[in-house]
Image: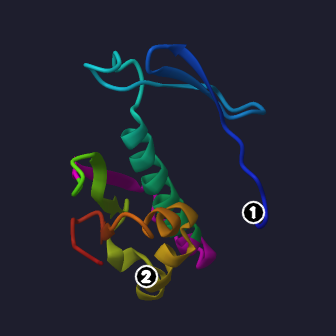
Amino acid sequence: MSNEQVTVELVQQRDYRFDIQFGDAVPHLIADEPAPLGSGKGPSPVQLLCAAVGSCLSDSLLFALRKFKQAPDPLHATVVAHVGRNAEGRLRVLRMDATLRLGVPASQLDHLDRVLTQFESYCTVTQSVGQGIPIAVKVLDANNTVLQ
């Protein structure tokens, strides 16, 4: 996916609700601000940012493990965006915490140490967003053992 352009179109439906069109055969998505601005009929922009970070980190971890023919499935990711006011009093995402949980115990996976030291650097979204928003990443196995 080098030197590629990704285009997404947003069409206002009503107030702060937008139909997000990804093109091709990808289903549309409705995004909406929560009340009092919107009606909460879809994920907010901050929720979409969390989804993008969590999806990219999960994809990167899965890809890295599968390169070593490992099966960590099913993966589970939780991303928390901490929203607050900046120095100018404007709402901003101040930091994000991402927790990835493997579907198996760490003892069932070979090369896990090597994967854990590298997978984040291949995550396009997290590495890009992380230049402006601190993102802490934690990885757990199926037994809730903290691996990173």
Residue 72 as seen in the image, left or right of residue 88? right
Label 1: how many residues lie within 10 Å, few (<14), some (14-19) or many (20+)? few
Q: Amino acid at mark 1?
A: Met
- Which circle, 2 or 1, is nearer the viewer? 1
Q: Position of residue 82 (x, y in %)?
A: 23, 52
Identify whether 38 is placed above or below 54.
above
Dot 2 surroundings within 10 Å: few (below 14), some, or many (20 or more)? some
Spot occupied by residue 60 in the image (x, y as percentages of width and height): 54, 66
Checking the image for residue 112, the label placed there is: 2
Say whether residue 143 is magenta.
no
Q: Which quarter of the rendering shows the C terminus?
A: bottom left
Instruction: State the residue at coordinates (57%, 74%).
Output: 122
Name the quadrant containing residue 112.
Answer: bottom left
- In the image, which residues are magenta? 64-85
Res 64 quadrant in image: bottom right
- Residue 134 visible? The answer is yes
Q: Disc 2 residue type? A: Leu
Residue located beneath label 1 in the image: 1
